[in-house]
Amino acid sequence: MTQAIITQLISYPIKSCAGIEYQIIQVNALGLAGDRQWMLVDDNGVFLSQRKHPCMALIQPQIQDNNLIVNAPGMNQLVLDVQSVQEPVEIKVWQDSFLAQTLGETANQWFSKYLGFTVRLVQYTNVSHRLIDQEFAQRQQPVAFADAYPILVTHESTLSQLNQQLSQPVDMSRFRPNIVVSTQQPAWDELNWQQLQTTDLQLDLVKPCSRCVMTGVEQTSGQQTGAEVLKTLSQKFAHQGKAVFGVNAIPQLKTGAGTKLAVGAQLTICQNPH
């Protein structure tokens, strides 16, 4: 059986903000532990992202015990007790409207000051009920504040081939993956994978990840650098007429409870039957 080796594991506590790299991390039905459990919304409850606000890349969250600790340029550190959630509010991620809970005015004012307009921080809690995009996976699978699916897998070979076509190479962080793998397989082979498996976890790879202007945001500077990456994906590597990079995945836990993934661990690749 063909193997993939995990080279990076990244969780993004606040949607569209900086990620945290792990050597080992718990996986549950919602994806990697702590991934996109918080989100910034505008006055209408609509999610905010780097698509319009690239400086969100410089918001750096940490999770310590029951605290969400947040740093950003020019701001004092924010420490929030994530158990002190307040009233439920209706929020919207793309076409999905559902409930989440706020974390109070201290948080709202901090993020509003950084971004320069009124925003609220919300948390995915037991009042939040959202299912994955049913168009590509017919099952009742929960998802938190990710765009549509719990996990994004990317392949180092594909980045290497993409970088050969760019005027300046880009880092994998441009694509905000959760799991990065290295294999002996060629670039774009991941689009033909059906599953990645360990003894107690199965990742069903259900849909190539469509790409947008966020591929132009340099994650360490929070600057939008332009459309070269997106244009190159569209013009030279289009999949079914679309710019894609990486594959969305759904975790299937064989034990019922959570399991762990570690950098350096091997995953067995199951190819789609042709």
Image (cartoon, rainbow, N blue to C red):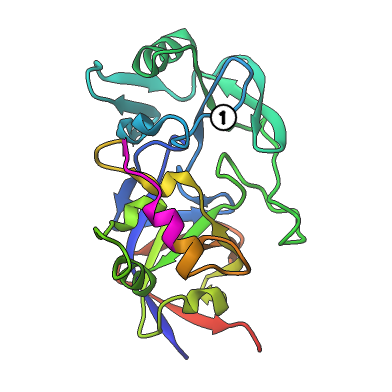
Asked whether the viewer can see residue 198, the reply is no
Q: Amino acid at mark 1?
A: Phe
The foreground one among 50 and 31 is 50
Asked whether the viewer can see residue 7, the reply is yes
**x, y (%) of residue 127?**
68, 29
User: Would residue 231 be counted in the magenta stretch?
Assistant: yes
- Relative to 64, residue 133 above or below: below
Q: Does residue 82 appear left or right of residue 142 in this picture?
A: left
> Looking at the figure, which quarter contains the C terminus?
bottom right
**x, y (%) of residue 242?**
58, 61
Q: Which residues are magenta?
A: 223-232
- Relative to 148, residue 162 above or below: below
User: Would residue 18 be counted in the magenta stretch?
Assistant: no
**x, y (%) of residue 163?**
30, 66
Q: Which residue lies under the disc numbered 1?
A: 47
- Relative to 240, residue 273 above or below: below
Residue at figure coordinates x 34%, y 30% from the top left = 55
- Relative to 240, residue 260 above or below: above
The foreground one among 111 and 175 is 175
The foreground one among 74 and 86 is 74
